[in-house]
Image (spheres, rainbow, N blue to C red):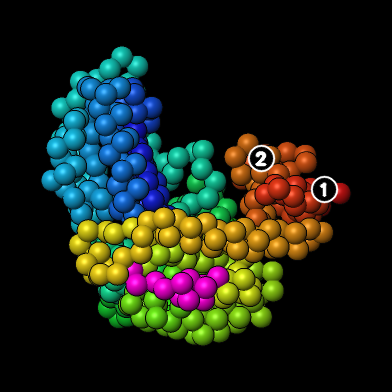
């Protein structure tokens, strides 16, 4: 049986897909192109209208090019609009997020009923921790969210917050490192709420402390963290540990307190500023990323200016800009005072100009620095601990922990040279 996995959206979806990939291989599946697969799983996102549209486009294309394929659709869009997706050509099943973890079990009967094609391997192939071509392991430690951000559909599609107990996370880290992964990214829908649902309750800080003491040979990276969850003790641990990448992704969403209130975000811009400044002070070389939305309902020109002003003077190193779009079912979608689409686009463009300047400044400042990095792809690219992608002048093997000196940064391209590695100094 040949299968293909198509993933949209966030790192949580990527982690879910990596786990599904492993499970499907374990029950005898062989990865294939969507055009040649018997089973195509589309793991959707519904964070924006264009995410929904991309998923529909892909599903239709598979249906056209491979009419024999059984298409199974899961993820946030599948949870939010099951009926709509079920009507698309070729869709055999729509699986909500709440059943996603049992998806492989549910698929077993479907897999068994598929005729074997010439060239298919035997069932029960050996279990792999992840696809061999990947270098960074996404480890989902939490899913669901109990917050009530007015623009977000995720609490409805992913349900309440649920966490993996610490011993289970440690066991998965062990497996990932035994399979050769040297970087593990901790992901979650609302990662900062990690452990609150467990009995006894625990926290992301306690998980990070346990990981810091884990004997596995790898480094860790914390993915997106809500600003109110970025507590001083966690920043301190990352600064002291040496095992956690100096990288915080802290979604601001808006630089105006009026909009933050309307969005249901439980902090002010000054609260946010204090968190970011604390990270910068403890970790001067850290990457600090953010998400900012343009054109939220009711956003006045002065609110937009507040976002621009804050970003321009902030120590952020990269910013993802999202133009606001209604997500049916959210509180924000029912708000009046929508901002016209031309204005939304223009404001998003203006925010992106500032975002590009911040990123450029961080890249140029890094020239001449030596940073630990992991070689990616074919070994010609390295990802530094502080989240810079650097082309290596002399490529090496992939998946090696190396020290690189950054030589140049221009036009969005950075270059560097290896000056030491996990095998010792090479200069
Ligand atoms: S914290 Fe807010 S934006 Fe993030 S998943 Fe929860 S409701 Fe959505």
Left/right placement of residue 115 relative to residue 11 reads left
Q: Residues within 10 Å of mark 2 (few under 14, many from 20)?
A: some
Residue under numbered circle 2: 379
Residue 422 at x, y percent in the picture: 71, 52
Discs 2/1, front: 2
Image quarter where the N terminus lies is top left
Left/right placement of residue 327 relative to residue 339 reads left
Numbered disc 2: secondary structure: loop
Question: Is 365 a magenta residue?
Answer: no
Residue 186 in the image: above or below residue 299 = above
Q: Which mark is residue 140?
A: none
272 or 193: which is nearer to us?
A: 272
State the residue at coordinates (44%, 70%). Answer: 253
Residue 192 in the image: above or below residue 173 = below
Q: Quadrant of residue 48?
A: bottom left
Q: Earlier in the sequence, mark 2 or mark 1?
A: 2
Q: Quadrant of residue 60?
A: top left
The magenta stretch is 297-308
Question: Is 299 a magenta residue?
Answer: yes
319 or 326: which is nearer to us?
A: 326
Residue under numbered circle 1: 426
Residue 169 visible in the displayed image: no
State the residue at coordinates (27%, 53%). Answer: 76
Question: Which secondary structure type mostly characterizes the magenta part of the structure?
Answer: helix
Q: Quadrant of residue 358?
A: bottom right
State the residue at coordinates (68%, 39%). Answer: 380
Residue at the right extreme, as displayed: 427
Residue 31 in the image: above or below residue 246 = above
Left/right placement of residue 244 relative to residue 167 reads right
Q: Residues within 10 Å of mark 1 (few under 14, many from 20)?
A: few
Q: How far apart are the alpha carbons under marks 2 and 1?
A: 16 Å
Residue 265 at x, y percent in the picture: 37, 77
């Amino acid at each position: 049986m040949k299968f293909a996995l198509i993933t949209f959206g966030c790192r949580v979806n990527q982690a879910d897909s990596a786990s599904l990939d492993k499970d499907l291989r374990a029950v005898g599946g062989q990865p294939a192109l969507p055009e040649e697969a018997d089973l195509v799983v589309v793991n959707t996102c519904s964070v924006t209208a264009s995410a929904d549209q991309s998923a529909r486009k892909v599903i239709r294309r598979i249906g056209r090019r491979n009419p024999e394929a059984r298409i199974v659709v899961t993820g946030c869009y599948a949870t939010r609009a099951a009926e709509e997706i079920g009507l698309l050509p070729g869709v055999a099943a729509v699986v909500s997020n709440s059943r996603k973890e049992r998806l492989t079990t549910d698929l077993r009967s479907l897999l068994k009923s598929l005729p074997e094609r010439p060239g298919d391997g035997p069932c029960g192939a050996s279990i792999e921790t992840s696809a061999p071509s990947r270098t960074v392991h996404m480890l989902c430690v939490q899913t669901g969210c109990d917050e009530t951000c007015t623009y977000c559909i995720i609490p409805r599609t992913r349900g309440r917050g649920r966490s993996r107990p610490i011993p289970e996370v440690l066991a998965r880290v062990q497996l990932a490192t035994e399979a050769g992964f040297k970087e593990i990214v901790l992901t979650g829908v609302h990662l900062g709420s990690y452990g609150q649902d467990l009995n006894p309750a625990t926290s992301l800080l306690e998980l990070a402390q346990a990981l810091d003491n884990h004997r596995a040979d790898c480094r860790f990276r914390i993915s997106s963290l809500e600003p109110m969850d970025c507590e001083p003790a966690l920043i301190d641990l990352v600064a002291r540990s040496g095992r956690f990448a100096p990288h915080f992704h802290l979604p601001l969403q808006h630089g105006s307190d009026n909009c933050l209130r309307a969005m249901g975000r439980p902090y002010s811009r000054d609260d946010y500023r204090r968190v970011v400044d604390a990270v910068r002070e403890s970790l001067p070389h850290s990457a600090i990323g953010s998400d900012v939305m343009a054109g939220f309902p009711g956003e006045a020109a002065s609110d937009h200016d507040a976002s621009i002003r804050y970003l321009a003077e902030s120590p952020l190193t990269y910013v993802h800009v999202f133009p606001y779009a209604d997500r049916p079912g959210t509180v924000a979608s029912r708000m009046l005072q929508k901002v016209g689409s031309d204005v939304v686009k223009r404001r998003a463009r203006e925010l992106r100009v500032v975002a590009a300047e911040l990123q450029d400044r961080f890249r140029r400042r890094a020239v001449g620095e030596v940073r630990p990095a992991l070689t990616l792809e074919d070994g010609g690219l390295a990802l530094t601990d502080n989240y810079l992608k650097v082309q290596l002048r002399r490529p090496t093997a992939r998946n090696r922990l190396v020290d690189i000196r950054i030589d140049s940064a221009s036009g969005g391209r950075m270059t560097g040279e290896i000056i030491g590695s996990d095998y010792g100094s090479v200069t």
